[in-house]
Structure formats: C-alpha cells, structure tokens
Amino acid sequence: MNIKPRCTATAVGSLPHLDPAQAIAVIFNAIPRAPIWPQLSKLGLREQMEIQYSEGLPRVVIDEAKSRMFFDTSGDCSEDLARFYESYLAAEESGDYSVAAISPEYSHGILALEAKLKTLGRRLPFVKLQVTGPLSIALTVVDENKRAIYYNEEFVDPIVKGMAMKARWQIQKFKPYAETVICFIDEPILAAFGSSTYVSVQRGDVIGKLSEIIQAIHAEGALAGVHCCGNTEWSLLVDAGVDIINVDAFEYGETIALYPAPMKTHLVERKNAIAYGVIPTSKAIREQSVGSLVAHFEKVTAHLAEKTGISLPVILEQAFITPSCGTGTLEIPDAERVFQLLGETCTALQRKYGFSS
C-alpha cells in the first residue's frame, strides 16, 4: 500500500460528550488532518458499540428495559434471513450501500462530522471511520437463550456482511472529503483470543471474517485498520490483510515485536502502517506529558526495530499516533486531555523527525 502517515494523529471512536458539536470541536482541535466521527455512547442505548451497527440485521431485538440487544432466533427465521440476503445482493449488484445506512438516532456523530467537513471547502489528508468487528458482536451479543450468537452459523454470516455493507456506506459518504479514507474494524474481543473462554474460536475463522470486511473496505478504495485495545496474536491481522494495525502501545506496545516475521511482511514487504496507541485512556493520562509520551513512543519503536531488524526510519514513517482506546468511559476533562496530548505529541514527533507539513 505504501502508507506513510509520518506520525499523523487519529483516534478511536468514542467520546463522553453529550453535544456532538463539542465532540467535533475537540476532535478538530487535536487531529485536524485525520478526524473521526465520534461515537457518543452517553447519549443513549442506540449509540452503544454493538447496537449502533445493528440496523438491518435480521431478528435483532433492542430491549430498552434491560439496556441490551439480542437476536431472536426462535421459530422459522428463513424469511427474515432471505430478506437480508436480498438486500445484500441488491447492494452488491448496484454498488449502492445506502440500505445499510446508520440512521441519525443511532449516530449523531456521523452527521456532525459530515456537517463540519462540508464547511471546510477542501479535502483533508485522511478521514477515519469505524465499524464494530464481527467477532466482538458475535461473541458478545446473545440469542434469546443467552447463548453467544457466534455459535449460530445462520446469523454470523449476516453480521459479517452487515458490517461490510456499513463500512462501504460510510466510505462512500465520506470519500468526497478526504484524499484517503480509513475504516477501522474495532475488535476488542481479540484480546481474549486463545483464552479458555474462547477455545472453540479457530484462527482461520477469525482471519476469514476479518478478511471479508477488509476486502469490502478495499473495494471502496479505502484503507482497512483493526483496533484491539489489549494484547492479541498480532500475526492474525497481518494474515487477514489489514493495512493498519492499531495497538494499545501504552500498555502492550512491545508485544508486536514478538512477531518479527509478520511485522516485516506488514511494514517492509507490504509497506503498511502501525497505529501506536501511546496516549493512555485511563486516569493515567493525568500524570502524562508530551515529553513522557514521546519517550514512550520512542521506546516502543526502538524495541520493534531492535527485535525485528526493521529500520527505525521505516517504522517512524509508517506510524500513526492514537489514544490506546476510546475515551467514552472517561470524565470529559480527562477525555479532552487525551485529545490535547494526542495533538501535541503528534506535533512534537513530526517536528523532531522532520515530518511537519
């Protein structure tokens, strides 16, 4: 892909604000070259990360009283499944994915970002979008019997295809506003891959489901990233064909160096990128400074260079800077400090390494 972001800053989706305009202001003050649309989970149930992408999926039930979503798989599901696949095939044939649109009551942030971009009168280097990953949905959301929907093959495929369509719809919407559109697949559940809880989840199945969405993103001419806010088997993402690996580099930055051959494939052969989540999204942000975060980033990247043999200039040129995760669970002052330090750390790194635009 030959991706050279040169320490450009972007972010993971969630913010704790109730006013979309305030969230957009925070975003553009910190990361004006690669803004995101904010997921505002405190606005209500429909902005939760699984529910936000549930429109159009077959047999979804949103239980307001219990603040949850589940799939009702009881009875004959064939008509509902057939209706979904008819919509999917029609979208594939026409290239119009508006059938998978995320409506305003499910995402105030999409409208807010689009409105802001319309006022700029120019294209930005990047715009970064996101969908919740199919594994995180399928292993977290249950059926009417409280069994993870992942174990019902009839419903897993619509989840994968549904997320692929929602990614394509977003990319089509935001293409006019950026030279390069990025769409992340947010897969926090990958931090538990290989644990006893998910021993039945096979490596090939993870790769296959991610690859289908990555290919859909590529079909729209966009870059595909995967965000995991924990440790995982990072070679999975390389094998799935992702362009950008987003790692919580504040806590787990050195773990990517445990996979030297896949990282060489990713960075050297494919010329892809790593997004280093060096800005903590916890109360630890209160003790950080630009100096401490620059030093931490340099420690992580130097370790990667030492353990893999990849030259440090390549690593630096092919780096994004992000928070370690979303900020939606933080208090607003802490979240805004995350974004302030994100922007300032990006600026400091770009000046230090001669990447300033």
Image (tube, grey):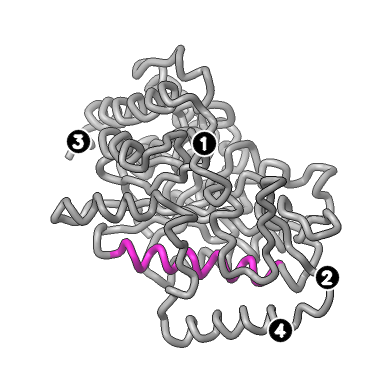
Q: Quadrant of the N terminus?
A: bottom left
Segment colored magenta:
156-175
Q: Residues within 10 Å of mark 4 (few under 14, many from 20)?
A: few
Magenta-span inclusion, residue 157? yes
Q: Quadrant of the C terminus?
A: top left
Instruction: Compare marks 2 and 4 and give the one earlier in the sequence.
Output: 2
Q: Main secondary structure of the magenta part?
A: helix
Q: Residues within 10 Å of mark 1 (few under 14, many from 20)?
A: many
Residue at numbered disc 2: 74
Instruction: Compare marks 4 and 3 and give the one earlier in the sequence.
Output: 4
Q: Secondary structure at mark 3?
A: loop
Residue at numbered disc 3: 356
**Most foreground residue, 280 or 57:** 57
Q: Secondary structure at mark 4?
A: helix
Mark yes or no: residue 69 visible: yes
Whether pointer 1 and pointer 4 mark residues with C-beta atoms closer than 8 Å, the reply is no
- Residue 289 at x, y = what percent? 38, 15
Q: CA distance from mark 1 to mark 4?
A: 39 Å
For badge 3, the amino acid type reads Ser
Residue at numbered disc 1: 325
